[in-house]
Image (cartoon, rainbow, N blue to C red):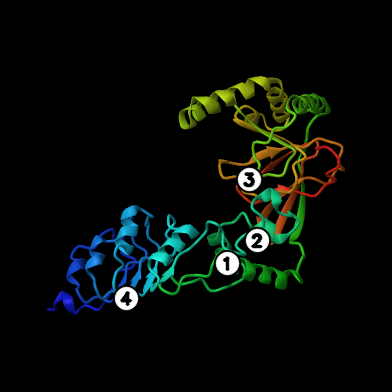
Amino acid sequence: SFHPSTIIELDLSHNSLSSIPGLSQLKNLKSLDIRRNEFRSLPSSLTQLQYLTNLNASRNHLRPSADFLVLLAKPPLPSLQRLDLTFNKKLFTQSLADLLTSSLPTVAIYMTVTSPPPPGAYVGDSPGERDATLLRSQLEPFTTLQLRHRLVETFGHASYSNYGAPPVGRAEVMTRLLEEYELVLGGAGKERKLVRSLGTPVPLSELDTLERELEAWSLRYDKFQERPMIRAAKYMILRSPNEAEEKMIQLGSRRAHSAIRKYQQNLSLWAAAKAAMATVDIRFANSFTGLAITKNFVGSPHIDTTNIGPFYGLSLGNFKDGTGGVRVELDAMTVCEVNTKNRLGKIDGRFVHFVAPYDVDETT
């Protein structure tokens, strides 16, 4: 048998814990590891551990509540020298890190700060600001975890251990990934393999009707940009009445009524799009619930987070055929460009996709 006061170090990591009964009895505890558990708040009995120098609370569900701050700083734990709060999703702001640092000047504090993003984490504040011809821009939509997986699965890097040191941050992950691509592709600025696919041609009669409706739509709305993160002269999303009613339940009646009003104002455009769609995929034509209309959509690598399946894209205008298609990543080393000029091409927007280069002075 042993007395609780004889315990100097305690590792409770990887145990799905949310509390530690009897912690206050460990009067001489110097190091406590509770990483990778289910804690939403730190144990209040920490204040009774006068000799605690090291606390690892990484990878929990901690929140920056008033109780959290009071426990740590009013007064500070007297012997604490190292505090690891990394990878707690709710503890992510630089302002919180600064507050803890000023409140605990003798403690080395580790946090995963994502707001504002640390230097080098991202290039450009939004997809529309990024040069879609650059590989880095095409990789930005991925999460840091997805980028780490690519280093491991595509380029053979060792995966980090759950029991070792925390993994490097996004900026370093991106740097390593671009270095690997440079080696494989034969130099900086080299593009991945590009394959091409033709969408299904839409009959001229449907195209003519749709083009007239789009021209009328553009005249109706001098300026309309519902997705400012995307680079486009105009961007509007129409919802079917059923979809709008669902939005009413989720978002409130005001926004739902606005969606229904937009649909009614553009009913003939919706019908023209549906008629064009029916020439290629009648089942999809009878079931789609959303229609995005854009003018001069450029680049903007992104991932659609609300799509439940692939979408169809179609473009019209006086730009050169074979340009301005939709590019979508097929795998880590391959991109497919779908020609959508006067054609309906099926694209899965849940993968990174963007508009291929074309003469922007012309109309799409």
Q: Amino acid at mark 1?
A: Glu
Q: Nearer the viewer, mark 3 or mark 4?
A: 4
- Of helix, strand and loop, which one carries label 4? loop
Which residue is at the front of the view, 298 or 267? 298
Name the residue carrying label 4: 53
* Distance Cα–Cα, label 1 vs label 4: 38 Å
Q: Which mark is residue 278?
A: none
What's the amino acid at mark 4? Thr
Q: What is the CA distance from the residue labelled 3 to the residue labelled 4?
A: 49 Å
Residue at which label 1 appears = 153
Q: What crowding class fits label 2: few (fewer than 14 Cα within 10 Å), some (14-19), or many (20 or more)?
A: some
Q: Residue at x 60, y 47 (%)?
A: 350
The N terminus - image quarter: bottom left
Q: Earlier in the sequence, mark 1 or mark 4?
A: 4
Nearer the observer, 30 or 341: 30
**C-alpha distance separating marks 1 and 2:** 10 Å
**Chain-order first, disc 3 or disc 1:** 1
Quarter of the image that includes the C terminus: top right
* Cα separation between marks 3 and 2: 16 Å
27 to 256, vertically: above or below: below
Q: Position of residue 59 (x, y in %)?
A: 40, 62
Amino acid type at mark 3:
Gly
> Which amino acid is tagged 2?
Ala
Q: Is residue 260 left or right of residue 34?
A: right
